[in-house]
Each structure stands twice: as structure tokens, then as C-alpha cells.
Image (cartoon, rainbow, N blue to C red):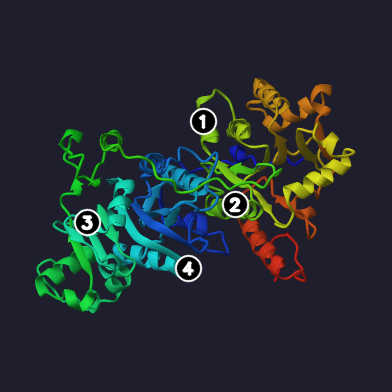
């Protein structure tokens, strides 16, 4: 019987306090492929933004990033996620390379990356110049035909009033300077009067970055009083041009602002409200919130919900982003999420990954982690017409099949669209299984569904049982009340829940549901599906080892 992924049952000898190198070598040893970093410069649609915002951060600053999402951009959670960056600003958290991290941090960070899709991670490299890395990342954005008026680079312990900043930039008057068109393009506005202060804030015109990276003295190092390794590129440039008087040579326009861009003075009462644009080096969460309130900083919208066509259902593709403490799925959590996210984007659905509901199972007595699936569905369902649940170890193999196409097919199965309106749950029972497989199902937002989920939650006798939530669902579906409004795809291995050994070209979703860790076969399968998408004559199976 296939019971779905049950990582609770896989013994892991790894503890939360264990330290992992970047990437963890003991996870990479058994892979033909290298570890896939969670973010590797995802594609952006060509677009113009008023501000391109890069927020530099450390891997373990998860709570700080959560605070900034909410207080800067109004993003409290991912229940209604940004599916495209269609606002006036584009932001990303740029996570600095790290040598090692605790397992708990890696697990939570991976979930964060999957859920918000707003993080760029950079692999560790010797002698890495972080500021240059950030500039190079910005250039990579430009190559995707993304244009912007200004770049804002801040560290994650800085608070900045983006609305006030935009008002000043739109006026072209910064402090006492009225900017010309050329000066706006080559603007470098920030703090350059002490070590580390240019990391708090930098506001750059679109023409300044290439100039900074191409200047010969950054490579050859014409040394001045401030040109020592401890100073960043921009501060070195500022002092170089001040001391050498070479401003005509580069056309960079520096504004060293110690009035609008200040360092945390340890009490909000010490912050001038009228002149302050940003406050840096604020290290306590409570004090960051105080600064936002003191300066009356309003949120700026990063994205707007995708507008549905008339009559189109709101559908969410939902999965787990929770990495179990055995770390089995850690190397491929992001590729699996991207497989589902790209499908959702292609067809106008939302993609929602959830981990908190799985994490919270630890607070219950004798309740297995997998019950987080039911908690997640209960939480997300009120926001959509339908949810399409997919376990983490599933891959959408055929991205051309839509949920709406399946609904049309289901309508024919039950005798028409009016009859399908009475269906609230669609789930499959594979041929070789005695019960349903709860790794893939579709559920409608309805009173029936809410009652169904609540009733499942009452099965305390199954909280630690081997079949768990799957058995609870199956038992309910065998009662007249719930069987009548369920479409059971009985003895069905191909509609939307196919095990690898049953796969046939064109099948929609492949579900591994293994007894051991499926990382290697899933990676192989993702590559094969992509190849098959490009070449329909490509012949393959999902048996392991990989075909040659």
C-alpha cells in the first residue's frame, strides 16, 4: 500500500544543533547532481520600476525579514502570495554567503525561500567582494530588460521611508542639491563618513553601477587614506574622488547625507521626524517597529493580485514547504516548489507553500507532523474557490494540463456540470491500494469541506497511527454523508496521482511516496520531464538508475 511520504518514520541521526557547511557535504555525497541552491537568479518579466530594492541579510535573520516584509510591503503571510512583481517597486532579500549554519536555520530558511520567493542566495566563494556581488546581481536584472529609476540598497537592520524617498527623488531636490538629468542617472546618495555606514543605505542612479564596477582603480587599487580593505567600494570611491578630485573623470555624483540618513540614536525620541528618511543599525525587533511607528511609515505595494477573467475560478496549488529534521528533502525542496510554482504561474493560479502548520504539530501530544497537511488546507481554503493539494514529493510532469480541463473531464464523469457543482472533493484510489492516496487531492471551498476537515481533525485515535490523516479521510468517505459529494477516482493511476513505476508519457502528476529518501530519482525525473517537454520523441522511464 502506498501511504504517501512519511518522513516521520525515517530515522534521522541529525540534531537541530548540528552544523552544516554550505552546502552540506553529507547530503551532496549521494547525488549525481550538485546541490541546487534555493535561488539562482529567477526570471523576471521585462518591466519598468520606480525603485529596485535590494535588502542585504544574513541567513539566520528570518524574523527580521518577516518584520520587513510586513512593515515595508504589507506582506504578513503567503496565503495570497505575490505571483508576479506588478507594482511600482521590485524588492529582493540578498542573503550573504555563509560558511556554516545550524540545521534548524537551514530548514526554516528553505521553507521561507519556498513560501515567499523573494530571496536571492549566493554560494560561498573565496575572496568574495559582497558589494561588488550586489552590483553584479543588479546588472543581471538589467539584462532581463528590467529598467528602473533608482536602486535602493539597505541592510536588514535599516528602516527607510520609501514613500518619502520617492517624493524627494521625484522632486529632483536632495538636501540642497537640485539634480540634473545626468546627476540623477549617476547619483550615489548615502553615508560614507565611517566604516560600515554605506551598508545602511545606498540610493543609486541607473548609470552609477557600471561606472563603479568599471573604474580601473577598484582593480589596481590606487591607494588613498580611505582605500583600505575594510572600506566598501562606494566609500572608497567617495574618498578617492574627494581626495584626488577626479569627479570629472567618472561623472559620479555623491551626496553624503548625515541628516536624512542617520544611525540609530537609541531612542525614537532622538529621531527628528521632519528630516529623517532612514535609520540604520537598529538591531532590536521592538525598536525597528517603534521607528516605523515614530516616522509614520506607510507600506508600499510590491504586487497586486492577478485579476481573474470573468467566471474564472480562484485556484491555489498548495504544497508543504516543511523540511523534516532528517533533512532528506532539503536539497530539492526548492526545485520541487519551482516545478509547482511555474505551473501555477503558467495557468493563472496561486502557489502556496506552508511549513508553520507542520511545525506546530510538535505542540500537540502524540500528533504526527503530517497532520500539518490538514491544518494547512483548513487555513488556506477560505481564500480560494478550489485548492489543489500536492505533497512535497510530487512533480507536475505535464504542465499543459489545467485544473479547468480536469474539471470538464470530471463533469462528464458525474453526468454534467450541474452535478459537478455538488462535488466538493476529488481524490484517487490507486489500483493496488486498499484506500485513497491523500498525497494529491482537490477540495472546494464549501461548508461541506469545512465540516469534512473539522471531522477529520477529531480523529485523535489516528494522530499517531501509521495511516494517520489518510485513514481519517478514507473512513469519512465511506459514510453516506461524505461519499455522495466526493468524486472518487477509483483504481485510477493516471488522472492526477501516478506512481513512478506506473508513469506513461502525458501523465499529469507523478508521486514518489517512498519508504526511503527519493532525492536522486526525483532530480532525474525533473530533468527527464523538461527534456520530454522540448522533444516529444524522447524515450525514458522513471526507473532508477537514470537512463543513458
- Nearer the N terminus, badge 1 or badge 2? 2
> What residue did someone put label 3 on?
174
Can residue 229 be seen here? The reply is no
Residue 411 in picture, x, y percent from top left: 84, 41
Q: Secondary structure at mark 1?
A: helix
Depth order, front residue of 112/539: 112
Q: Residue 77 bears which disc, if any? A: none
Q: Residue at x 83, y 43 (%)?
A: 410
> What residue did someone put label 1 on?
360
Q: Secondary structure at mark 2?
A: helix
Residue 53 in picture, x, y percent from top left: 37, 55
Q: Quadrant of residue 69?
A: top left
- Nearer the N terminus, badge 4 or badge 3? 4
Q: CA distance from mark 3 to mark 1?
A: 49 Å
> What residue did someone put label 2 on?
341
Q: Secondary structure at mark 4?
A: loop
Q: Is residue 349 above or below residue 234?
A: above
Depth order, front residue of 90/403: 90
Amino acid at each position: 500500500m502506498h501511504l504517501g511520504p512519511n518522513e516521520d518514520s525515517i530515522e534521522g541521526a541529525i540534531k537541530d544543533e548540528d552544523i552544516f557547511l554550505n552546502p552540506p557535504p553529507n547530503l551532496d555525497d549521494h547525488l549525481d547532481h550538485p546541490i541546487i541552491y534555493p535561488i539562482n537568479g529567477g526570471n523576471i518579466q521585462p518591466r519598468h520600476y520606480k525603485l529596485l530594492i535590494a535588502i542585504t541579510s544574513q541567513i539566520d535573520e528570518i524574523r527580521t525579514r518577516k518584520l520587513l516584509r510586513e512593515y515595508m510591503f504589507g506582506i504578513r503571510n503567503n496565503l495570497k502570495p505575490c505571483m508576479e512583481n506588478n507594482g511600482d517597486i521590485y524588492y529582493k532579500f540578498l542573503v550573504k554567503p555563509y560558511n556554516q549554519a545550524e540545521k534548524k536555520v537551514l530548514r526554516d530558511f528553505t521553507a521561507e525561500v519556498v513560501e515567499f520567493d523573494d530571496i536571492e542566495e549566493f554560494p560561498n566563494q573565496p575572496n568574495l567582494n559582497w558589494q561588488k556581488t550586489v552590483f553584479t546581481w543588479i546588472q543581471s536584472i538589467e539584462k532581463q530588460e528590467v529598467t528602473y529609476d533608482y536602486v535602493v540598497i539597505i541592510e536588514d537592520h535599516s528602516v527607510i521611508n520609501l514613500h518619502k524617498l520617492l517624493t524627494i527623488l521625484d522632486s529632483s531636490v536632495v538636501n540642497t542639491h537640485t539634480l540634473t538629468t545626468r546627476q540623477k542617472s549617476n547619483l550615489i546618495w548615502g553615508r560614507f563618513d565611517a566604516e560600515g555606514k554605506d551598508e545602511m543605505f545606498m540610493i543609486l542612479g541607473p548609470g552609477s553601477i557600471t561606472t563603479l564596477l568599471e573604474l580601473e582603480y577598484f582593480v589596481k587599487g590606487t591607494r588613498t587614506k580611505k582605500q583600505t580593505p575594510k572600506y566598501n567600494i562606494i566609500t572608497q570611491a567617495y574618498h578617492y574622488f574627494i581626495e584626488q578630485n577626479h569627479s570629472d573623470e567618472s561623472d559620479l555624483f555623491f551626496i553624503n547625507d548625515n541628516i536624512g540618513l542617520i544611525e540609530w540614536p537609541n531612542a525614537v525620541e532622538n529621531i527628528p521626524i521632519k528630516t529623517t528618511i532612514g535609520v540604520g543599525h537598529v538591531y532590536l525587533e521592538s525598536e525597528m517597529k517603534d521607528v516605523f511607528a515614530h516616522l509614520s511609515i506607510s507600506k508600499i505595494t510590491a504586487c497586486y493580485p492577478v485579476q481573474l477573467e470573468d467566471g474564472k475560478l480562484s485556484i491555489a496549488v498548495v504544497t508543504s514547504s516543511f523540511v523534516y529534521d532528517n533533512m532528506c528533502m532539503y536539497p530539492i525542496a526548492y526545485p520541487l516548489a519551482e516545478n509547482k510554482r511555474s505551473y501555477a504561474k503558467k495557468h493563472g493560479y496561486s502557489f502556496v507553500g506552508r511549513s508553520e502548520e507542520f511545525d506546530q504539530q510538535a505542540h500537540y501530544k502524540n500528533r504526527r507532523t503530517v497532520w500539518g497537511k490538514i491544518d494547512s488546507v483548513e487555513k488556506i481554503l477560505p481564500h480560494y474557490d478550489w485548492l489543489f493539494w500536492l505533497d512535497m514529493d510530487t512533480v507536475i510532469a505535464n504542465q499543459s494540463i489545467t485544473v479547468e480541463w480536469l474539471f470538464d473531464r470530471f463533469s462528464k464523469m458525474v453526468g454534467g456540470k450541474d452535478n459537478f457543482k455538488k462535488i466538493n472533493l476529488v481524490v484517487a484510489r490507486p489500483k493496488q491500494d486498499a484506500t485513497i492516496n491523500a498525497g494529491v487531492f482537490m477540495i472546494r471551498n464549501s461548508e461541506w469541506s469545512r465540516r469534512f476537515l473539522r471531522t477529520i481533525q477529531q480523529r485523535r485515535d489516528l494522530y499517531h497511527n501509521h495511516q494517520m490523516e489518510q485513514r481519517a479521510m478514507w473512513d469519512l468517505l465511506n459514510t453516506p454523508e461524505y461519499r455522495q459529494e466526493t468524486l472518487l477516482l477509483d483504481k485510477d493511476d493516471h488522472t492526477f496521482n501516478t506512481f513512478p513505476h506506473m508513469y506513461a508519457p502525458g501523465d499529469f502528476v507523478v508521486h514518489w511516496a517512498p519508504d526511503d529518501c527519493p532525492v536522486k530519482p526525483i532530480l532525474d525525473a525533473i530533468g527527464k520531464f523538461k527534456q520530454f517537454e522540448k522533444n516529444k520523441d524522447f524515450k525514458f522511464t522513471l526507473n532508477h538508475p537514470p537512463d543513458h
